[in-house]
Image: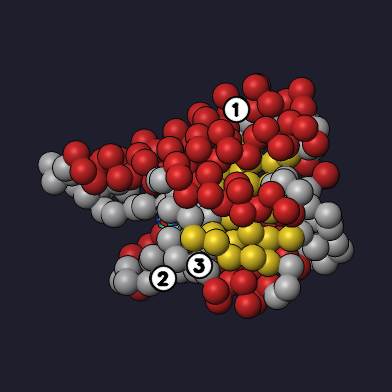
Amino acid sequence: MTTGKTHEGKVALVTGAGQGIGQAIAVALGERGASVIATDLAIPQETVSKIGSTARGFQLDVTKEEDWNAVLTKSQDWGGVDIVVNNAGYFPNRPIDELDLATWRKTITTNLDSHFLSVKYFLPAMRKKKWGRFVGISSNMVGLAIPGMSHYIATKMGIIGFMRGLANDVADDGITANAVLPGLTETLATAQQPDEMKRSVWEQQAIKRLGKPNDITGAVLFLTSNDASFITGQAIVVDGGQYRIG
Ligand SMILES: NC(=O)c1ccc[n+]([C@@H]2O[C@H](COP(=O)([O-])OP(=O)(O)OC[C@H]3O[C@@H](n4cnc5c(N)ncnc54)[C@H](O)[C@@H]3O)[C@@H](O)[C@H]2O)c1
C-alpha cells in the first residue's frame, strides 16, 4: 500500500472515531498526513493518542445539531475542515414486528440526520476553498437478505441517495460526495455474533476471511484524495467480493 503523504495539508473530521472502523479511518488519514479531528460520543482519547500531535479529539453526538455547531467553532483555528467521514452508526437488530418508533427514529437520526448536519456546518468552508470531500459509511447489507434490519437498511440506502443528490449540488466547487459500503467487519459491534454466523457470511465472499477495520480504510483514503477528484455520487462496496452490483 502507498504510504505517501497524500493528505498533507488537509483537515479531516471522522465521526464515531473512538473504536472500530471509525478509529481505523482516523488513524489511516493521520498516517497519510491529514490533521485529524476525531469525534465520538465521548472524546476518543485512544484514537488521538494513536495519531499523535496532528490529531484533536472532540465530543460530538452526531444526532445533536448543537454538537456539530460546537465542533465547527472549535475547529476554526485549523482553517476549516476539508474532509468529512460520517462513520458513526446505530444498528440494533429488530425484526419488523418488534421494531418500535423510538428505535426507528434513533436509527434514522444517527445514521442520516448526521450526514445532513455535517453538510450544513462544514460545506461553507469547503465551498470557499473550492475543495472538499464527504464520505458516508453505508453498508453492503443494502444488498443482502438479512432479517431484522429494515430500519438500518433504510438508512444505509438513504446515505447512498443523499451522497448522489449532494454530489449534484456541490460539484461546481470541487467537492465530491461518495458512499463506502463495508461488508461484515470485525469490530466491538460485531464481536458478539457467533463464529458460525460470521463464517457463513465470509464464505459467500470471493476473499474468504472476515473483514477487519483496516480493510475499509483504503477506499476512504482513495475517495478523499486528489486521485478521486472525478469520482462523485458513487457507492463503493468493500466486502471481499460478497455483494456484486452492475
Ligand atoms: N462492523 C460491521 O460489520 C459493519 C458493516 C457495514 C457497515 N458498518 C458501518 O460502519 C460504521 C462503524 O461500524 P463499527 O462496526 O466500527 O461500529 P462500532 O459500534 O464498533 O463503533 C461505532 C462508533 O460510533 C459511535 N457512535 C454511536 N452513536 C453515535 C452518535 N450518536 N454520535 C457519535 N458517535 C456515535 C460509538 O460510540 C462507536 O465508537 C457504522 O456506520 C456501521 O453501520 C459496519
> Disc 1 residue type?
Leu
Q: Residue at x 13, y 42 (%)?
A: 97
Residue 64 vs residue 144, the one in the foreground? 64
Measured from the top left, where is residue 74 in percent x and y?
61, 54
Given contact means CB atoms under 8 Å apart, are the residues at marks 1 and 2 in contact?
no
- 209 with respect to 222 (left or right): left
Residue type (three-letter) at the residue carrying disc 2: Leu
Residue that label 3 marks: 43
Label 2 residue near ligand 1, CB within 8 Å: yes
Position of 55 compared to 121: left or right? right
Instruction: Report the residue marked by disc 1.
Output: 166
- Quarter of the image where one finds residue 107: top left
**How far is the residue under mark 1 from the one under mark 2?**
31 Å
Q: Secondary structure at mark 2?
A: loop
Outermost residue toward the left in this view: 97
Q: Amino acid at mark 3?
A: Ile
SS at mark 3 in the image: loop
Q: Which residue is mark 2?
A: 188
Q: Position of residue 39 (x, y in %)?
A: 54, 59
The foreground one among 65 and 164 is 65
